[in-house]
Image: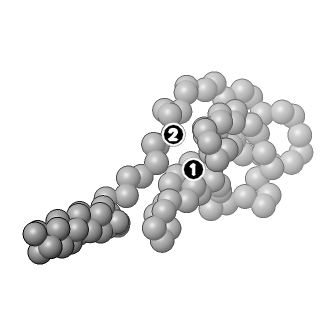
Amino acid sequence: MHRRVSLCLLAGGLVLLAGCDTPPREALAAPAPPPPVPAETVPLPPVTEERLIWQPGHWDWTGSRYLWREGRWVSRRDHGVEWQPGYWTREGDGWSWVPAHWF
C-alpha cells in the first residue's frame, strides 16, 4: 500500500514538472503586424527654399496598440534616401518594435 501511494505521488510530481517546460524559441508567436497602410494623397510641397522630401504615413506602436501617423513634408537635410516602415524584430526571448525611419 505504501509503495502504491509513493508511486502515485511520484507520478503526480512528474506531471506537475512537465507543465513547467518552456516552449522552444520557434514557438514564440510574433506580435500581430500593423494594419494595412491606408491610401494617402500626397499634397504639393509647401513653397520654401529648403529641399523637402515626403515622409509617408506610417503606423507606430504605442506599447499597447498601433497609432497612425499621417504623411508630411520634411526637410531632406538630416534624412537618408530610403524610408523603412516600422516592423517587429526578434530580440532574445521576445519581440521588439523598430519604429519607422529613414536610412
Q: How crowded is mark 2: few (under 14 residues within 10 Å), some or many (20 or more)?
A: some
Residue occupying the point 45% across, 42% down? 32
Label 2's element?
loop
Residue under numbered circle 1: 86
Residue at position x 77%, y 33% from top?
A: 45
Q: Position of residue 99 (x, y in %)?
A: 63, 53
Taking depth in this image into account, of 9 and 60 the one nearest to the observer is 9
The amino acid sitting under disc 2 is Pro
> Residue 38, relative to residue 55: is it above or below?
above
Residue at the image point whose x is 65% and y is 34% from the top: 68
Residue 56 place in picture, x, y as percent: 64, 39
Quadrant of residue 74 within the rendered picture: top right
Q: How crowded is mark 1: few (under 14 residues within 10 Å), some or many (20 or more)?
A: some
Residue 84 is left or right of residue 47, and the answer is: left
Residue 35: image x %, image y %? 50, 34
The residue wearing badge 2 is: 34
Kindly identify the residue that appears in the image at 57 percent across and 50 percent down. 86
Give how far apart the Cα atoms at labels 1 and 2 are. Answer: 8 Å
Residue 7 seen from this side? no
Q: In which quarter of the image is the N terminus?
A: bottom left
72 relative position to 93: left or right: right
Q: Quadrant of residue 28?
A: bottom left
Q: What element carries label 1?
A: loop
The figure's colour scheme reads one colour
Residue 75 visible from this viewpoint: yes
Rendered position, 21 above or below 33: below
Query: Residue most toward the right?
Result: 49
In the displayed structure, would residue 67 be above or below residue 12? above
Determine contact: label 1, label 2, CB under 8 Å. yes
Q: Which one is nearer the viewer's eye here, 40 or 1?
A: 1
Count the marks.
2
- Camera-side residue of 66 and 80: 66
